[in-house]
Image (spheres, rainbow, N blue to C red):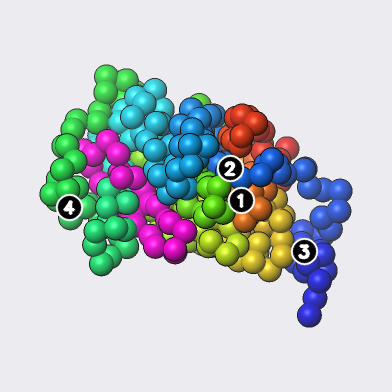
Amino acid sequence: MITRRQFVNRSLAVTTGVTLTGTIQASLKSKNLPVAVSTWDHGVPANKEAIKILLNGGTALDAVESGVRVPEADPDVMTVGYGSFPDRDGHITLDACIMDEKGNAGSVSFLQHIKHPVSVARKVMEDTPHVMLSGAGALKFALEKGFKKEELMTEKSTAAWKKWLVKSEYKPVINIENHDTISMLAVDKHGNLSGACTTSGMAFKMHGRVGDSPIIGAGLYCDNEVGGAAATGHGEYVMRTLGSFLVVELMRNGLSPMEACKEAVMRTVRTNKDLNRVQIGYIAVNKTGETAGFSLHEGFSFAHSDKEGTTLNKADSYLK
Ligand code: ASP
């Protein structure tokens, strides 16, 4: 039986040539539960909504759903929900998923015309025998459940698409505008954990492209015995390592949230030669409410909330 420290050092020393001691920025320890953590600057208003629910005794599941609905509805957040950047054919197609403390999961992908895909994902989880609905089927289900069909393109997203069409070059720029997928993890006062993830995916993607965000284990994973993890960035790289599942499994084996996020990033580092134009970032929380964020390139931020308030934190990164 190897100790936790041996496990950490073994996995990282073999793969990166460094041991962890002294290389890890402190992760955030919440002052008791509840706690919420979410990706990017737009995590701040999302977290404020979530922590309000948690401090009033609400469940982690309600908190993460309500929290991520804030950027979904905000047309100035152009990578989530209403007013997003479209795909290269001018369509906004949305991906989202949710997991509760019992290990239940719901997900929608390639969903059009619905402002709150995370709430449709929750309905898939609660009202169907399935985990994932996609495209026209997901839309049909949403309409049957009473969601409103809406035009999600705004003047701003239409103008951005027209500008992109001039050159029609697909060149994602890392960290651009600092508002990507919103992923949120929360532990409520009973110690129960849930997570949610919602996005319009990579701007100007191919029509039909689905990223990591609605894939359980890639964009999000929660295990009530261990903790939760969620991803942002270039989904293709997260999908290839099933990154969020990996982070949770590493925590199960004794790594802290920070150590686990770092090792998940290192998996991508080890298997890819040119990562100059690729960003990935992970957030994680364990059962005691310790949270962390870590990314490949610098520039990733995450919001942390507990009863002391909400902070926006710069994530440590592999490349500085
Ligand atoms: N992970 C998302 C995707 O690939 C986008 C992002 O978080 O930046 O669809």
Can you tell which mark lies on residue 35?
2
Which badge, 1 or 2, comes first in the chain's sequence? 2
Distance in Å between CA atoms under marks 2 and 4: 32 Å
Q: In which quadrant of the rendered image does the C terminus lie?
A: top right
Q: Which residues are magenta?
A: 96-119
Instruction: Using a 10 Å C-alpha cutoff, classify the residue at mark 2 as few (fewer than 14 neighbours), some (14 to 19) or many (20 or more).
Output: many
Q: Nearer the viewer, mark 2 or mark 3?
A: 2
In the picture, measured across the screen, residue 71 lies left or right of residue 113, that is: right
The answer to whether residue 104 is magenta is yes
Distance in Å between CA atoms under marks 2 and 3: 25 Å
Can you tell which mark lies on residue 77?
none
Q: Are marks 1 and 2 in contact (CB under 8 Å)?
A: yes
Distance in Å between CA atoms under marks 1 and 2: 9 Å
Which badge, 1 or 4, comes first in the chain's sequence? 4
Q: Is residue 102 above or below residue 162?
A: below
For the point 24% across and 62% down, the residue is 128
Which badge, 2 or 3, comes first in the chain's sequence? 3
